[in-house]
Amino acid sequence: MSGEAIEVRGLTKRYGDDTAVAGVDLTVHRGEVFSFLGPNGAGKSTTVEILEGFRRRDGGSVRVLGEDPGTAGRVWRSRIGVVWQQETQVPALPVRDLVRHFAGYYPESHDPDEVVERVGLAEKAKALPSSLSGGQRRRLDVALGIVGRPELLFLDEPTTGFDPQARRDFWSLVRELADGGTSIVLTTHYLEEAEELADRVCVIARGRVRALGDPATLGGRASARATVHWTVEGRRRETVTDEPARVVGELSACFDGEVPGLSVHRPTLEETYLELIGQDGGAEAAGRSTV
Amino acid sequence: MSTDTAPAPGPAPSGPGHARRLPGALRIGLSRGRVEIRSFSREWESLVFTFSLPALILVLFASVFDGMFDMGMPAVDHYLPGMIAMGLMSVSFQLLGTGIAGERENGGLRRLRGTPMPPSAYFIGKTVLVAFLSFGQTVLLLGVAVLGFGARLPSDAGSWATLAWVLLLGTVSCALLGIAVSSLARSAQAASAVVVVPFLVLQFTSGVFVPVVALPDWVVDAAGLFPLLWMAQGIRAGFFPEEMAALEPGGSWDLPQVALALGTWCVVGLVLTLVTFRWKTRRDG
């Protein structure tokens, strides 16, 4: 295998007068977990659906697993897996039979029983889809998305509506797939999900890439100015600084030991994200995006 | 990345020297046919409304109307051809018209587009489903009529041959028309309106419930633009004694006209299907 999983240059898509995607450039490497973040209507779903070969683009070049998704054929489709955003209908067949049936579409599928086991539906193998809970139903979608042994898996808001435990179980499944060498494109609304799973995140707002990089350093987050808080005579004080360690040292010397109410805060991914998608923050961030 | 030899969790190895052999369209299509049949048989609404309704109506008519009007034959014999025509249109036109619109709306078709399933396999699956249900529908109606009410079946090979081609052409034309209508409707709910209402109107204007001799000419002419009237007429030709032909609009069974009308609808339905079929809803752009 060679080349990148996904290469996008100058991608545009319009709906009537409305420009949904206004020149997106990005690259997804083989074997990485790549996450799209962005508000509703920002163009991320449109971008992902173009990559999946479901929507046509108006401009730019797109290569997914070395082919143009707009014209790629069945062999290409057998190399990708898609877990759609909306709940999609499946025939009224027991879970195991459904996974077995979809496995028959692919040249080299996983063992259907193993897939049912891995997504945690072994106890529901004989249940009908209509009897599954929301989280179980989503895991069935994932089973159908991975049974064909995809090289590249698209997960579109896979954990919406999950309880915290189900979400953590799902995360470990995604990590397992990534460790096995599957490239993963994850679209999500949950910042902690992107931070937990993604090697790189791409923030899209108003049809453009606003920032792209390691979630730990996104938008200059790691080197951003820190806020140091402490308390003097019952009143909360704070200072914003580039050198939080020096400030804490000085405070410590001043108080001769422990500093009351001490905290050092750097922007969370959520704060960075909100700044990036904001009107001004977005424009500013676009200037320093690291595509 | 080097060649991936990891077991279960990894993606399938690919690239040069590792040609992927895709399963054939026919194999996937037949597998889809089995799945469609199993899935259909689990949905009691479709079992009742799409599959069993004609047999229920036949039971009602054969019991209630027998001897009430002068039909020149027992009520079961009188209504059986129309019920077969209606039953076959139900498991082809109504089933596909509402079913495919539903699959398009609720993402069933979208899911399939994300897999390497060839489009032809989808239609092979639908063909298997409609063929299975048409056969079952015919057997059910004949069984109810013969075992329950002692209906008279044709005794000569010529009549059976007529029935065979009329049932085949009628079912194919209605199935294609159903697929085309599913694409014209904006949503699944709209599809059930544009399928069920015209179908009901046709049942009353095509000689299914009311004999065509009792209908005004313009009604018969209008109904004659659609396949149901011709199906019913062709099936009557197979079941009814020869002298009943006098009650048909042209005073004869007019089988060439039946063949021409149904054959034309097969061609028109196929063209409409090819031109209008969409994997996406209109919203998906």
Image (spheres, coloured by chain):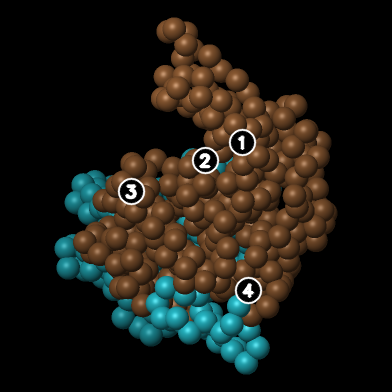
Chain colours: A brown, B cyan
Q: Amino acid at mark 2?
A: Leu
Which residue, given by chain and number where applicable, does mark 2 sit on?
A: A191
CB within 8 Å, label 4 to label 2: no
Residue at 54% from the left image edge and 53% from the top image edge: A198
Q: Amino acid at mark 1?
A: Tyr
Q: Earlier in the sequence, mark 2 or mark 3?
A: 3
Q: Where does the N terminus of chain B fall, quadrant-wise?
A: bottom right
Which residue, given by chain and number where applicable, does mark 1 sit on?
A: A273
Q: How many numbered tags mark residues here? A: 4
Image side of residue A44 versus residue B255, left or right: right
Image side of residue B238 versus residue A269, left or right: left
Which residue, given by chain and number where applicable, does mark 4 sit on?
A: A76
- Using the numbered discs, state the Cα–Cα distance from disc 4 to disc 3 in whole angstroms: 31 Å
Q: Earlier in the sequence, mark 3 or mark 1?
A: 3
Element type at mark 2: helix
- Using the numbered discs, state the Cα–Cα distance from disc 2 to disc 1 in whole angstroms: 8 Å
